[in-house]
Amino acid sequence: MLGVLRFSTLFSILVLIINPKFVSETFTIDKPKLPVVVDNSASVRALNQVENVNSLIKSLKGNQALNDKFDLSFYSFGSNLRDSDSLTFTKKNTNISRALGSVNELFKNQTAPTLLITDGNQTIGSDYEFTSSELTNEVFPIILGDSITYTDIKIELLNTNRYAFLKNQFPVEVLLVYAGESSISSEFIVQQGNSIIYKEKLSFSLNDNTKTISFTIPALDVGLQKYKAQILPLQDEKNTTNNRKQFAVEVIDQATNVLVISEITHPDLGAFKKAITTNDQRRVIFKRPSEAISILNDYQIVLLYQPDRNFRGVYSEIAKLKKNTFVITGLQTDWNFLNNIQENYIKNVNNQSEDVSGSLNPNYGTFAIDDIGFASLKPLKTLFGDLEILAPHDIVLEQYIDGIASESPMLVTMEVDGVRHAIWDGENIWKWRAQCFIDTDSFEDFDDFLGKMIQYLASNKRRSRLEVTNEGYYYNNNSIKVSAQYFDQNFIFDSRASLLITVTNSETKDKIVLPMLLKNNFYDIDLNSLSAGEYQYTVAVSDQTVMRSGNFTILDFDVEEQFLNADVTKLNKLATNTGGKAFFITETSEILSALIKDDSFQLTQKRAQKVVPLIDWKYLLGLIVFLLTSEWFLRKYNGLI
């Protein structure tokens, strides 16, 4: 027995040392992917294709041969791509380019032909006809609708200002498009309520199929003024929804006048003017210090660009009139003069310059600001030295040097004895506006930021613990946002508060109560689910008596109902550019047959080799311990130890 135990122990140790192995092979079958991407926008319902889409999806899911060959997955899209739990066909916008791009990323480096079920009518985003070259898999468009051309006349585009000044004329530009072969006549009218305020008779033909009308409308009353533009429909016209469009203008009784005073010429001045006048409510006038003294009282805000000793008379007049100011400093600022002429801030400088960057202060709470990526913008120029703020203030942008926070602020707002001031210590601000355009293809982010600064400085309204911001009107196919800020009794932004908004339809009295979500340094809510109409709202703070009320109007305009038929031409080009093939929704059997019989989409057999030990070392080690233990007990029992 002892010999057997000893032999077994030594044999197990040798097996453990040698560690014999064998190769294990497993085989798996991989199906090619088949993402089915369905247009969930309202245009599908407008073209009466809902039943056809549901029938096609049912056929795809129920076809055994197709499911044996492909691994199907279903998605829907409007503005964005989503997993297809259910289809409502109510999305207000269509972005085909983004949907295809998202599918391309999901199935990158995989065989995944895409079934795109859509009418091809895109309302937002890049043109999918030109972005199709970036797709790595074939696209098979399933065209909803038909290619028949119907006689139609429509309002293609209507442009007008968002704001107008009382007793002024505001311009309106309308582009009308006719699709048809015969010569026709119609009449374009603009109504306010039941009154016709503009009309014009027009003629169209096969060759003369577009008309651009420009006219002006007088702004006679303050407040939101709603209008309806309409081109009278033709006889037996299939789609009359695109014959009319509502628009509105908010009439105000005064503008915000900004006086920019500078002794020098600099690109920053042009950038400020462009950004400020993006809003039609604002006007900018440039003057030298000697010219500005006599007209200061005509402006709500005075922007002082790099002041020097020539500004002495300007500062004296500003102090008398208690004007709000916005000071921009830089390399040509006379800080010795500036330190002596006012008492709100001081900076001891030398002749050296330095590059400084800015970063948004997340605790800034005077008004709501979105971070436009300040930290990544190009550095500004300023004179070396620390800026010290002597008055009660809030820091908008903190100053950074080579990525390290300095003790100086870059942009500060303050309110002293009811007068509002701001100082921005940095030159070459025009580069920030230019970089925003390079990064986003739009000046909007920078202009909105500067616009909020001007709006704050131009107002002398006392600060409230609850500030609510909204537009007077929205189009129901755009984002409908209301934002708010809540401050504690020390006027410090309170991020722990719970804000609720109650929205009531003025006509139906239907009421909804929703929580507002915290976003950076303000609360925000998107009310896209509301239908067209007039609404009143109340924003209240839970467990507090603080609340604010207001109203807004949602104008009815459904861009998805403007189409007569499918965009067959673009969908065919999309199929050709990606190596796929386009089908009409009525060709369900041909679609299934083409996919099943296409030899380019084959099942893939994958072999996986795995080298594994003959005996798991854990079990072998346990056996050795057991054998040695048994031998020891046996020897001990027989007195051999």
Image (cartoon, rainbow, N blue to C red):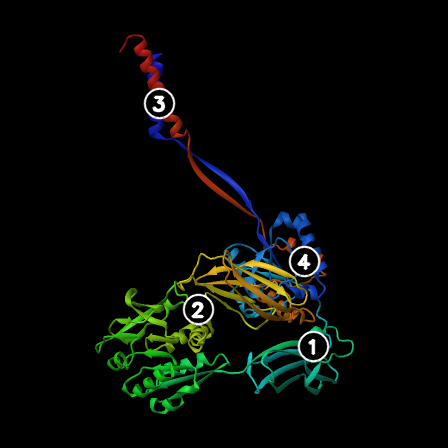
Label 4 SS:
helix
Residue that carries the numbered disc 1 in the rendered image = 243
Tell us which disc is closer to us: 1 or 4: 1
Q: CA distance from mark 3 to mark 4?
A: 65 Å
User: How many residues crowd around disc 3 within 10 Å: few (fewer than 14), some, or many (20 or more)?
Assistant: many
User: How many residues crowd around disc 4 within 10 Å: few (fewer than 14), some, or many (20 or more)?
Assistant: many
Tell us which disc is closer to us: 1 or 3: 1
Give the mark, 4 or 2, whose residue is nearer the N terminus: 2
- Badge 2 vs badge 3, beta-carbon distance below 8 Å: no
Q: CA distance from mark 2 to mark 1?
A: 41 Å
Name the image quarter holding the N terminus. Answer: top left
Asked if 320 appears above or below 26 in the picture, the reply is below
Give the mark, 2 or 3, whose residue is nearer the N terminus: 2
Asked if 632 appears above or below 529 in the picture, the reply is above
Q: Which label number is shown at residue 383?
A: none
Q: CA distance from mark 1 to mark 3?
A: 90 Å
The quadrant in which residue 77 appears is: bottom right
Q: Residue at x 72, y 73 (%)?
A: 239
Q: CA distance from mark 1 to mark 4?
A: 36 Å
Residue that carries the numbered disc 2 in the rendered image = 367
User: How many residues crowd around disc 2 within 10 Å: few (fewer than 14), some, or many (20 or more)?
Assistant: some
Q: Which label number is shown at residue 624?
A: 3
Three-letter residue code for mark 4: Ile
Tell us which disc is closer to us: 4 or 2: 2
